[in-house]
Image (cartoon, rainbow, N blue to C red):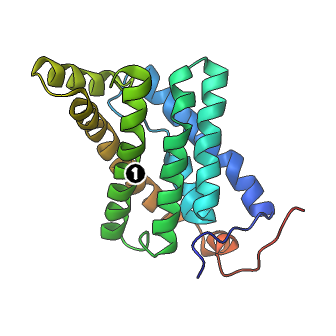
């Protein structure tokens, strides 16, 4: 089975905007309530798990760009790379069978969370001096700096505190959503089906 095999058929074309919409609403909800989570990658992970890593990457990056431009949130634009990585990670893990059971979904969440940490931490340092833009995470960062920790370590801890729990919640939600979908629907996205192209 090819991990990056991708179908661009009608089912996938409908899936992408639906997943972007789920991401958009989740992020808006988290920001309005100032939650210690992002909640902006549920759609990304659904797209990755159903359509594969490429579709997950498209859903993730597109959401950040759309949200950033429509709300004026420049921080979100930078993290399109992180969302892309989360979509790829979730898609690969799903293709390897790691969304078939609850314990494996937890492992997928850890992989997606650590992927986000690895990509976001350098971005945090380069663009924002180590902060994430999340109120609770940045409180942790401030505490690390007050304790005299290096910026890179403080930023890493900031990301871990926010991203790993966020991805755990995200992938648990995604796991139950996917389990609740009818087999006839999920079968439309199986990688072994014939690949259709738009060109």
Q: Assign the C terminus to one quadrant of the image.
A: bottom right
Answer yes or no: is residue 177 visible: no
- Is 129 situated left or right of 147 in this image? right
Q: Residue at x 60, y 42 (%)?
A: 61
- Where residue 28 sits: x, y (%)? 52, 27
Q: Quadrant of residue 154?
A: top left
Q: Quadrant of residue 52?
A: bottom right
- Where residue 131 sits: x, y (%)? 34, 24
In this orientation, which residue lies closer to the viewer: 24 or 59? 59
Q: Residue at x 43, y 29 (%)?
A: 30
- Where residue 87 sits: x, y (%)? 53, 53
- Where residue 192 sits: x, y (%)? 66, 81
Q: Residue furthest right?
A: 199
Answer yes or no: is residue 121 visible: yes
Q: Secondary structure at mark 1?
A: helix
93 versus 64 height, above or below: below
In this orientation, which residue lies closer to the viewer: 12 or 173? 12
In this orientation, which residue lies closer to the viewer: 81 or 23? 81
Q: Residues within 10 Å of mark 1 (few under 14, many from 20)?
A: many
Q: Quadrant of residue 60?
A: top right
Q: Which residue is mark 1?
A: 115
Q: Residue at x 26, y 32 (%)?
A: 152
Q: Assign the N terminus to one quadrant of the image.
A: bottom right
| Count of marks overlaid on the render | 1
Q: Residue at x 69, y 54 (%)?
A: 15
5 versus 49 height, above or below: below
- Is 18 situated left or right of 93 in this image? right
């Amino acid at each position: 089975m090819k991990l990056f095999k991708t179908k661009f058929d009608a089912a996938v074309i409908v899936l992408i905007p639906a997943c972007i919409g789920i991401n958009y609403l989740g992020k808006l909800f988290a920001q309005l309530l100032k939650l210690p989570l992002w909640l902006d990658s549920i759609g990304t992970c659904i797209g990755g798990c159903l359509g594969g890593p490429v579709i997950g990457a498209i859903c993730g990056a597109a959401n950040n760009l759309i949200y950033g431009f429509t709300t004026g949130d420049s921080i979100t634009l930078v993290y399109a790379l992180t969302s892309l990585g989360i979509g790829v990670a979730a898609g690969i893990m799903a293709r390897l069978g790691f969304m078939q059971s609850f314990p494996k979904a937890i492992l997928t969440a850890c992989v997606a969370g650590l992927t986000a940490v690895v990509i976001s931490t350098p971005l945090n340092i380069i663009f924002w001096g180590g902060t994430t833009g999340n109120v609770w995470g940045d409180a942790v960062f401030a505490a690390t700096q007050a304790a005299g920790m290096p910026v890179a370590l403080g930023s890493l801890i900031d990301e871990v505190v926010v991203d790993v729990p966020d991805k755990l919640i995200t992938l648990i939600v995604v796991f139950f959503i996917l389990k609740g979908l009818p087999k006839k629907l999920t079968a439309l996205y199986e990688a072994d089906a014939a690949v259709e192209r738009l060109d």
